[in-house]
Image: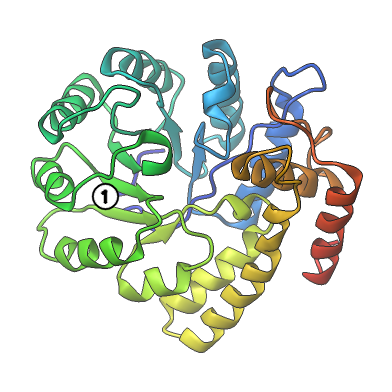
Amino acid sequence: MSLPALLRGVVPPLCTPLTPDGEVDTRSLAALTTRLVDAGVHGLFALGSSGEAAYLTDAQRCTALDTVVETAAGRVPVLAGAIDMTTARVLEHARAAEALGADAVVATAPFFTRTHPAEITEHFTRLRTALGVPLFAYDIPASAHTKLPADLLLSLAADDVLAGLKDSSGDDGALRRLLVRVRELSGGFSVLTGSELAVDGALLAGAHGVVPGLGNVDPEGYLRLYEHASAGRWREAAAEQDRLAALFALTDAGDENIMGRSSSALGAFKAALHLLGVIDCPATAAPQLPLGPAAVKTVRRLLEDAELL
């Protein structure tokens, strides 16, 4: 389906289920996609950070995206991550995503090498010129090592280069200031927060939606939160946000002595989906280590506390 002029709502960044030997588990991915669409999400974001795109081969990325697009079957728009270090490599991923039926492409600034804002502008402009689908910027300085400046984003929005932003900067102050300026744009520019723990505040400030990794596990919770906020029921929205914040503790279940924070979060999402019977295997891509039995027990307890299991 075509992307709306202003994308709003809950757009979960899909996990990519894997088989024990590290291949994309298309059956489980289709089941997860169906679960989220049936829950009523407003879109899907494949091949983002929660989708372990950085760990997948080009062929695996295509397999995953093809599965999501085919399963979604036009019921909701599918955004596809085209995440790589340089413009030429991102273009290859973006063109492949468009050919597979993605409704929009999501890209970071170039990374590994240091990049000037003028070069980031050139990067996004080249991508948009080459594509026939909308382009979203992905602001994730923890991974790309560049914070996308508001002036740059607004200029590219005004020039119809960018259709929107997925903000995973962790900088709530900068996001708030950006949202104030977005109101002055004449065209559509969708700002989606990637912060699972401050969605109610972001929506109150004017964000158009949320891209929550935890939405793989509890899409209904984020949909209730979004519906409360859309209706101005801020007390109910805050209560739902508090419940989701408690559930988000599952991302801390991993042993920080043997795995990174991202590995713990991804492992917890997959462990939760496995416990819920959505995916067949909770494996994460190498070299990430799996959650131990004690961590999985913690994930189970939190699912039970949230009345999901």
Residue at 46% x, 20% y: name it. Answer: 100
Q: Which image quarter holds the N terminus? A: top left
Residue 241 at x, y = what percent?
57, 74
Indicate the quadrant where residue 236 lies.
bottom right
Badge 1 density bin: few <14, some 14–19, many ≥20, Cα 10 Å: few
Determine whether, in the image, residue 237 is placed left or right of residue 254: left
Residue 106 at x, y = what percent?
36, 35
Determine whether, in the image, residue 179 is placed left or right of residue 202: left
Q: Which image quarter holds the C terminus? A: bottom right
Taking depth in this image into account, of 164 and 43 the one nearest to the observer is: 164
Q: Secondary structure at mark 1?
A: loop
Residue 107 at x, y = what percent?
34, 32
Indicate the quadrant where residue 204 lies.
bottom left
Q: How is the image coloured?
A: rainbow
Residue at 41% x, 15% y: name it. Answer: 96
Determine whether, in the image, residue 136 is placed left or right of residue 18: left
**Is 40 situated above or below 161?**
below
**What is the tally of numbered marks visible in this picture?**
1
Q: Is residue 194 visible?
A: yes
Determine whether, in the image, residue 6 is placed left or right of residue 150: right
Residue at 36% x, 42% y: name it. Answer: 141
Q: Amino acid at mark 1?
A: Ala
Residue 105 at x, y = what percent?
36, 32
**Is 22 situated above or below 281?**
above
**Is 156 situated above or below 243?**
above
Q: Is residue 104 visible?
A: no
Q: Badge 1 is on which residue?
A: 5
Indicate the quadrant where residue 215 lies.
bottom right
Residue at 28% x, 35% y: name it. Answer: 135
**Is 295 situated above or below 72?**
below
